Amino acid sequence: TRASITKDALSQFFPPQPFEAVQEILKRKAKPRKSKQRHNFPFTGLLTCGQCGSAITAQYAHGNGGTYRYYRCTKKKGNCAQKYLREDLLVSQLKARLQSVALCDEWTKKMLAKVGEWEKENVHSSQSFVQNLEAEQSEVSAKLDKLVSTYIDGDVPKESYLAKKEELMMRKLALTNQKEDFGRMGKNWIEPLRSWILDIQKAKKLSQGDNFEDIKAFVQKVGTNHQLLDKSASFSFSAPWDYVALRLVQSHQAEGRSGEAILSEKRESIVLWTYGESNPDLPDVHRDVL
């Protein structure tokens, strides 16, 4: 028959194989394909070209007896005259930029200690504030109970009762909302301030180390408008980092002045930093800290 002839013809091209051989073929085909090896370019995705706005890519290049990583414009938006920048030079530039917001350990230690003092004061004042709110809530509830009893006894006209009840209910609702808002926001300025000071410490460590991934993440966190132009990496500090950078620049400029002038400036800075003592609930992390 046609079926048998076809089967016989196919058997010449696909002879029967032992079970073990078939299993080996299936096992070999089941192995996952090896993925292409990815290159390690830690600073890709951080910068854009300052001339044409294209993304910055990276590649390996050989020279001077070694292999180096370079960063360059992708030139996907057209002609661009920007040249390559070697990775070690890029790292040096980013570290120098981080140095401009890095404070000495003595200052960060004092700042953290001051935040600890404010935290204790804030806890005490918070407890007093909540106790006062709860006392007023109890007082309003007592007045409501008394008002209802007086109305039931017929001692208060209905119109007066409804007006007074509305007033007390509105006050009770306001106190409840005030207590809830305080619970959500009462301590919100302490932890961001402490976290920011710890980041200042981190800026110094990163500027002295070689953890490229952490350097990239930190630069992304504290800066905006990251660009590469004329073999120079640049970015602008976001608030409050821009303020720290400005004060450090002013401090360096003051180094050439007389010792008396510098001492006077330091005294003023300490007064500005300790201003929070007179207003511990001030939720602004932009205090003068230098």
Image (cartoon, grey):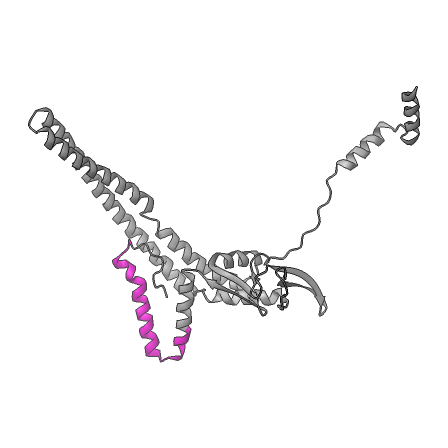
Please check the rendered image and state whether residue 265 is part of the magenta-colored stretch, yes or no: yes
Q: Is residue 37 above or below residue 142?
A: below
Magenta residue span: 252-281
- Residue 249 placement: quadrant: bottom left
The structure residue drawn at horizontal position 24% and vertical position 46%, both measured from the top left corner, is: 129
Please check the rendered image and state whether residue 205 is part of the magenta-colored stretch, yes or no: no
Q: Nearer the viewer, residue 11 or 129?
A: 11
Residue 118 shows in the view: yes
Q: Is residue 157 above or below residue 93?
A: above
The structure residue drawn at horizontal position 37% and vertical position 57%, both measured from the top left corner, is: 112
- Residue 259 placement: quadrant: bottom left
The structure residue drawn at horizontal position 91% and vertical position 31%, both measured from the top left corner, is: 13
Q: Quadrant of the C terminus?
A: bottom left
Query: Looking at the picture, how far across and down is residue 33, in whole percent?
Result: 73, 42
Q: Is residue 93 above or below residue 112?
A: below
Q: Quadrant of the N terminus?
A: top right
Query: Looking at the picture, how far across and down is residue 94, in whole percent?
Result: 53, 64
The structure residue drawn at horizontal position 83% and vertical position 30%, both measured from the top left corner, is: 22
Residue 143 shows in the view: no
Q: Residue furthest top?
A: 1
